[in-house]
Amino acid sequence: MPDQGASDRPLWRRLAITVLHIPLPGLGLLWLGRLGVGLVLLVLTQVVGNIALPPLRLLPTTRDHEQFTLMWLAAVVILSLGLLTWSTILVWRDSRQALSPHRFRWHWPYWVAWAGIVAIAALAPDPPIHAYSVTSPSMEPTLHVAERVWADQRVGQRLKRGDLVVYLGADENVRLGRLVAIGGERVAMRDGVLILNGKAVPLQPMPGMAGSPPGRVFRERLPDGQDHLVLDLGMRPQDNVAERLVPRGHVFVLGDSRDNSLDSRFDPAMDGPGMVPSQDVLGRVFLIYWSKQFDRIGRAP
């Protein structure tokens, strides 16, 4: 039967019910006794979160299909926001006149729903697109500290020189780095210039651009034609590295901030990753989805 004091429910209580509902739209409505619409919203939320993203694994992993991947992700985000907005309005409206949540018959759908969510989370396939936060300046000027990026971690990723990748370091922490060489290639550094298979990689000065911390910015063009920006902070010991052969099944990664990065030039004994096993490369970063500089949102690094 209706809650005798429903129409006079304190504002703080209505706000609490509404806020607690936001992480999982539908649960607030179940708590308020709206069994039908609550279950529908809950199912839709789980479908969007746990079923809509995994099919991306079926798409080819080439760059030609990244535009479709971004459209898919945008559709998922828009649909999720729509469901959240609609359900929040319903909870706020019904939190005043809802059936009493103190009757046990309204509790069992709530707890059963929680059990179903836990089961779905445990059994749902891992989504192929993962989000990461940039926590160090090692990839300046390409990525800034506190920016957030999406990485494509589909199995069978066809990586190549120049890709910005996420990988597991020797300490099992996830790191960011620029893949510059693959197994069987020779790598060296001479006065800050990358040497691949005995040939210097061209560096073009970029006047007017400055990194953080301040330094000289160059455009580096790899042998396959892909280019990116690198930051030079002056002469450092790591600017000169004797030639090394990248073992088969490994890759060589560098930070774009060449003087402020623990990358493959440093062995695990020096807190670096050394040569990275190919199986430890988790995927390729393809989009900045959050930045304090709004004009950088949506850029491909």
Image: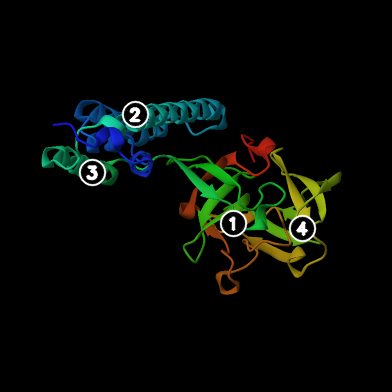
Q: Residues within 10 Å of mark 3 (few under 14, many from 20)?
A: some
Q: Are marks 3 and 1 in contact (CB under 8 Å)?
A: no
Say which mark, if any, is on residue 93. 2
Depicted 11 relative to depicted 245: above or below: above
Name the front one of labels 2 and 3.
2
Task: Give the CA separation, mark 3 to mark 1.
Answer: 34 Å
Q: Secondary structure at mark 4?
A: loop
**Mark before the other along the chain sequence, 3 or 4:** 3
> What residue sits right under mark 1 in the picture?
135
Rendered residue at 69%/39% (across/down): 224
**Mark before the other along the chain sequence, 2 or 1:** 2
For the residue pair 158 and 46, the one nearer the viewer reads as 46
Task: Give the CA separation, mark 4 to mark 2.
Answer: 51 Å
For the residue pair 249 and 80, the one nearer the viewer reads as 80
Q: Is residue 71 left or right of residue 45?
A: right
The amino acid pointed to by label 2 is Arg
**Number of residue marks:** 4
The amino acid pointed to by label 3 is Trp
Task: Give the CA separation, mark 2 to mark 1.
Answer: 41 Å
Depicted 200 relative to depicted 66: above or below: below
> What residue sits right under mark 4 in the picture?
213
Residue 117 placement (x, y as % from top left): 25, 42
The residue most toward the bottom is: 269
Q: Secondary structure at mark 2?
A: helix
